[in-house]
Amino acid sequence: MRRFFLIFTILFITTFRSQGQINLEHIYTGVSAAYVKLPVAGYKYYVMDVTNNQCRLYNNDHSLWKTISLSIPANYYLYDIQFVTENLFNTDNLIELMYVSYTYNTTSAYYTYDTRIANENGTVLLSIPGGGYSAIYSAQSGSRLFAWVYDYSVSPSTVSTMIYALPGQVLTNIQEPTAKSGFSMPLSFPNPATNSITIPYILPESVHQAELKLYNSNGQVVKTFNIDHTFDNILIQTNDLPAGMYLYRIEAANFKSETYKFAISK
């Protein structure tokens, strides 16, 4: 009986370990990575290299497939790669990227954005000065690109919406690049940060209390702060955090903001 119980226990443990196990497959060090299904090339990993103004694409075995250099305006910094596609913005079978860069006015304390769509060979297909956030939707015929253009140099700040008809058809997995909250917030500053960073935030009127969560590049929560309508920004000390890329967003019971990025340099 004891022998039977021992054999049963070993089989149970072996079966349990073989199911539902999470395994670390790969680490892309020092960069922000994502995954995309391309209509022709298939599934690819891609990373955003802020230091070198590059987008690198990798095969499913994590071997390098393509390195694409991104055209960034002078004194701007790469902030986000919003779309990696094929045959959406034109029909030349080249990889197309939509990406955002920014510059920060230290005197007047405001950001200026720039959104560009480019082919993998560096040809810029569209430039949207001031464009900071975009989404692509299936329309009654074809697809539409919505680009929100912000001007923080005036008070109150302004936002305009640019709508473009696209030659290609959007895929469902790239239709909405960020959270569906409908709320956009000013970016944190300074970025990159060293000892501290100021994160402005906006709460919907129906949300009275929420949490601002700070994530590292591995998706782990490293800091959590309670926020409400008393203030519209929070100062976070970052001298205890290692250098790298971080994400943050606001979460409440029935609300999640868009996800934002910033870097810490030492």
Image (cartoon, helix red, strand yellow):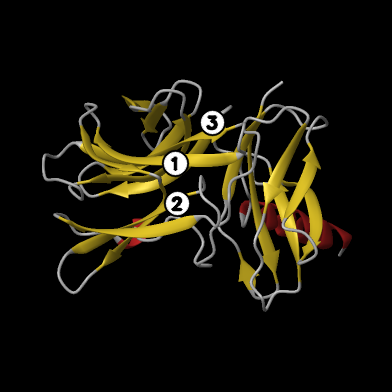
**Which of these two is toward me, 32 or 194?**
194
Q: Residue 7: give x, y in percent of width and height.
A: 77, 56
- Front residue (pair 245, 126): 126
- Mark 2 vs mark 3: in front: 2
Task: Look at the numbered disc 3 and give the secondary structure of its residue.
Answer: loop
Residue bearing the label numbered 3: 31
For the C terminus, the image quarter is: top right
Q: In which quarter of the image is the N terminus?
A: bottom right
How far apart are the alpha carbons under marks 1 and 2?
Answer: 8 Å
Answer few, some or many: residues within 10 Å of disc 2's Cα (few below 14, many 20 plus, some between 14 and 19). Answer: many
Q: Which amino acid does label 2 sit on?
A: Tyr
**Residue 122 coordinates in the image, percent (x, y):** 24, 27
Which of pointers 2 and 3 lies earlier in the amino acid sequence? 3
Q: Decide: marks 1, 3 in contact (CB < 8 A)? A: no
Q: Is mark 2 on a helix, strand or loop?
A: strand
What is the distance, in whole Å, between disc 1 and disc 3 at their CAs?
A: 21 Å
Labelled disc at residue 60: none
Instruction: Say the numbered circle drawn on residue 150.
Output: 2
- In the rendered view, would you say 239 is above or below 256? above
Residue 83 in picture, x, y percent from top left: 35, 47
Q: Which amino acid does label 3 sit on?
A: Val
At horizontal 50% and vertical 22% (from top left) the residue drawn is: 51
User: Contact, CB < 8 Å: mark 1 with mark 2?
Assistant: yes
> Residues at badges 2 and 3 in contact (C-beta under 8 Å)?
no
Q: Which amino acid does label 1 sit on?
A: Tyr
Front: mark 1 or 3: 1
123 lies above or below 4: above
Outermost residue toward the left? Answer: 92
**Seen in the image, is 131 located left or right of residue 181?**
left
Q: Residue furthest front?
A: 155
- The residue singled out by tag 1 in the image is 113
